[in-house]
Structures are given as C-alpha cells and as structure tokens.
Image (cartoon, helix red, strand yellow):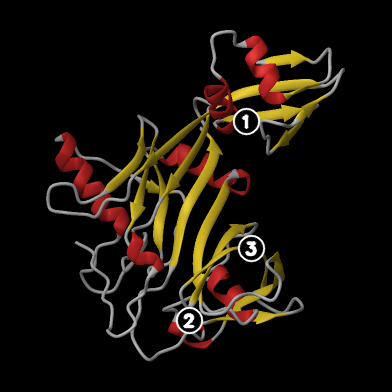
Amino acid sequence: MSYNIEKETSLVDFILEIKKNLSKQKAKKLIQNSKITINGKVIKALPNTILKPGDELDISKVEIIEKKPSRPDKHRPFAIYFEDSHLIIAVKPAGIISAGKTAGNEKTFHKRMEEYLSKRDDNKTRLWAVHRIDREVEGLIVFSKSEKLKEKLSENWSNFTKKYLALTEQKPENENGFIENWLREGENLKVLVSEKETDGSKFAKTEYTFLRTIGKYHLLEIKLHTGRKNQIRVHLAHIGCPIAGDRKYGAMSDFKRKVRLVAFYISFNHPVTEKEITIEYKPADTFYHPSQNADEKYKIF
C-alpha cells in the first residue's frame, strides 16, 4: 500500500500509527519482511529509517520461505522450499549435475526431480530448468512447470537477486568490493580470467562481502551481477581467496574436500502472481567445518 508522509517520523513509529493493534516487535518484523519503497526507490529499510514530510512510502508484503536444512532420504529425497502450479524451487545437493546431458547413465537433478514428482503425484510431470549451478555446488534451483513460463523467467533472469555463501582459504584484502573482468573457457574445461575482452570471453561481475572468520577459513557473502560458468570460483581464486575444497581453482589438495559454495538466497517477482518471492536456505553445520584429517565424499542419494 502507498502512503503520503505528512510529518517527520521513524518508519517503525509510522507503522505503529497506521496499524493500531500491532506491537512494536511485530512492526519491526513487518518491516523486515516487506519491500519498502520511498519516493520510488527500493531501500533496505530499518525501523529507525527517517520519513520526511512529502515522502511517498510504499509497503508491499514479501513472501519469505525459510526451512531448516534437511538431508535427502529414501522417503523424501528432496528439500522443496517452494511449489505452486507454476514453479518449484528445491535444494540441489552438491555432487550432482543440475540439468542437461550427462555421461553414461548418470541422472541429473532435473531428471530426478521429474521422476520424484511423477511418483508422488501419480501423474507424469515435466519440468524446465530455469538456470543451473555447478555440480560441486549445493543450493536453490528454480524449475518451471511449463516451457513458456521457463522462457519468460529466463528472459528476466537479470532481475533475480542471487546470493551465495563461500568459505575461502584466505581473507580478501578488502572486506567488501567488486570483481570485474572477462572470463573464457580454456583447456580441460577450466575458466580463465582476462583483464580485457578477448575472443570468446564474456564480461563477469561479482560482488562480495566478508562476514566472519570460522577457524582457519573465512565466510563471504557473494552477490552475482552476471552468471558465467564457474564465475564465483574463478573470481575468488583470482583475488587470492580460493574456495575451500575447490582444487580445480587453487585450493589446498592435502585432502579431498567438498567445495564450500552454496546458493543460499534467491529473490524475484513471481511471473504469474507478481508477488515477490524471497527464499533463504541454511546449509548444514558441516558446510562451515571442512574435515581437517580425512577425505570427504559427496553423498547424493
């Protein structure tokens, strides 16, 4: 809903004024779970955000879906975080290909999802993968239940907000910043960095923020501004911060560790209902604590 501000006040006080039966704690929760626009600009609003006379305030509800991490088992092999008649969003385990062609009889996450839903609903189900994440990476993947809708989502993919968590072996020199350059695929399917555009290269931009140190590792939050193959892994290695377990891009190889990169957050406007959907996934505690004395194996199904 839209409001015209007539006197200077804080955002939380304004909410309490228009929502007479709301407690201050619930007013803060409403702010946290809403999309706040002031004078046409979306802001990261806090309860003490100051509203001034003449400001135009718009508050729209955001649907946040958050679940505790779950591990696949024979009864419920997938953690599904959102589903309606148009879309389904689930967590892909690390160690399995998202979609597309595979060697031999290996099944993609896409194919396994189709088989699971067909059995669950006793009706043949088809899905279309809107995007992919690397085999070594776990996290949220969006599927469409129609090809037409998949094309619409793909066309608007740049409007999706996508965030990752990365556990790195080194702390970046600057605690936040942008990495911008050109990427191209070289030999052995390894992606290479170039500071200027070359034949076959694509511009890539990654935003990172240091969160905290965990033991000998460092946790970063990553926001993608482009979506290139292996982009986060290559960019972090390029600034001297390889992701734990990512031996392909310079991580220590004394033990075989799972790659500590997870697609934990996605936000977008539902293409049919137009409601903003924001989903957060919390990885298991083992994500933050790689084994220090043994090889790790991906456990799929």
Q: Is residue 295 left or right of residue 130?
A: left
What distance separates the C-alpha of mark 3 from that of mark 1?
23 Å
Q: Are marks 3 and 2 in contact (CB under 8 Å)?
A: no
Q: Position of residue 150 (x, y in %)?
A: 46, 42
Circles 3 and 1 in contact, beta carbons < 8 Å: no
User: CA separation, marks 3 and 2?
Assistant: 25 Å
Quarter of the picture holding the N terminus: top right
- Please report the residue visible at 70 percent of the width from the left and 22 percent of the height from the top: 58
Residue 152 vs 162, above or below: the answer is above
Residue beneath disc 1: 35
As measured in the structure, the alpha-carbon distance from the residue carrying label 1 to the one carrying label 2 is 41 Å
- Classed neighbour count for the residue bearing mark 2: other residues with Cα under 10 Å, few (<14), some (14–19), many (≥20): few
Name the amino acid type tagged 2: Leu
User: How far from the left and from the top, in percent, is residue 85?
Assistant: 35, 29
- Look at label 1 and name its amino acid: Lys
Quadrant housing residue 183? bottom right
Tag 3, which secondary structure?
A: strand
Residue at image coords 37%, 65%: 287
| Label placed on residue 189 | 2
**In the foreground, 119 or 89:** 89
Q: Position of residue 56 (x, y in %)?
A: 79, 20
The residue under label 3 is 208
Q: Amino acid at mark 3?
A: Tyr
Dot 2: what SS? Answer: helix
Residue at horizontal 67%, vertical 35%? 46
Q: Is residue 97 above or below residue 280?
A: below
Q: Residue furthest right?
A: 54
Q: Earlier in the sequence, mark 3 or mark 2?
A: 2
Residue at disc 1, secondary structure: strand
Query: Is residue 283 toward the left or the right of residue 50 in the image?
Result: left
